[in-house]
Image (cartoon, rainbow, N blue to C red):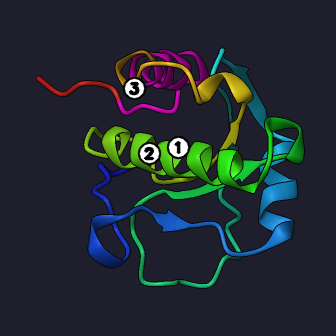
Amino acid sequence: MTTSAPTGRSGRPARLPDRRDFLRVQAGKRCAMPGFVLQIAPRPSDLPPSGTAGPRVGFTVSRKVGNAVERNRVRRRLRALAATALRRPLRCDLDYVLVGRKEALGRDFTALTAELEKALDRLGARLPATP
């Protein structure tokens, strides 16, 4: 396991490209929080090298959350949340999916950040601190 840094264009995390990746991560571990659900799964070993060494992140928001404007607002908040979280070392052998909930619209960003930190710790997705 190596430490991660935001990869991809303009400092954003690498994205999960395909539906099959989302389905694979959906079958993995999950941690529900008031504003989102964090899902993780090991990255497949047969994955061709994509030039990204860091973790891959996917975002999804269902139509239950609201109309297109509200869904996009939640998706933007989740992207900013992931960019903030990737400043700290995460396991690069995992893929991550953030599933947005309607509560993410009204929650304070610092509360969402604290929830993401808690979810990452619960799922063991963070690298141990090095002295």
Number of labels in the image equals 3
The residue type indicated by label 1 comes to Leu
Please name the residue that numbered disc 1 is placed on.
78
Magenta stretch: includes residue 113? yes
> Can residue 117 be seen in the rendering of this structure?
yes
Q: Nearer the viewer, residue 66 or 31?
A: 66
Q: Which numbered disc, 3 or 2, marks the residue that appears first in the sequence? A: 2
Residue 82: mark in rendering: 2
Q: Is residue 57 above or below residue 62?
A: below
Q: Which numbered disc, 3 or 1, marks the residue that appears first in the sequence? A: 1
Q: Secondary structure at mark 3?
A: helix
Q: Taking 120 as reference, is 11 left or right?
A: left
* Main SS class of the magenta portion in the image: helix
The residue type indicated by label 2 comes to Ala
Expressed as whole percent of the image width and height from the top left, the position of residue 104 reads 60, 28
Expressed as whole percent of the image width and height from the top left, the position of residue 102 reads 72, 28
- At a point 62% along the width and 84% down the height, the residue shown is 48
Instruction: Write the start and end of the magenta stretch as one range.
Output: 112-127
Q: Nearer the viewer, residue 17 or 89?
A: 17
Q: Is residue 48 above or below residue 107?
A: below
Q: CA distance from mark 3 to mark 1?
A: 10 Å
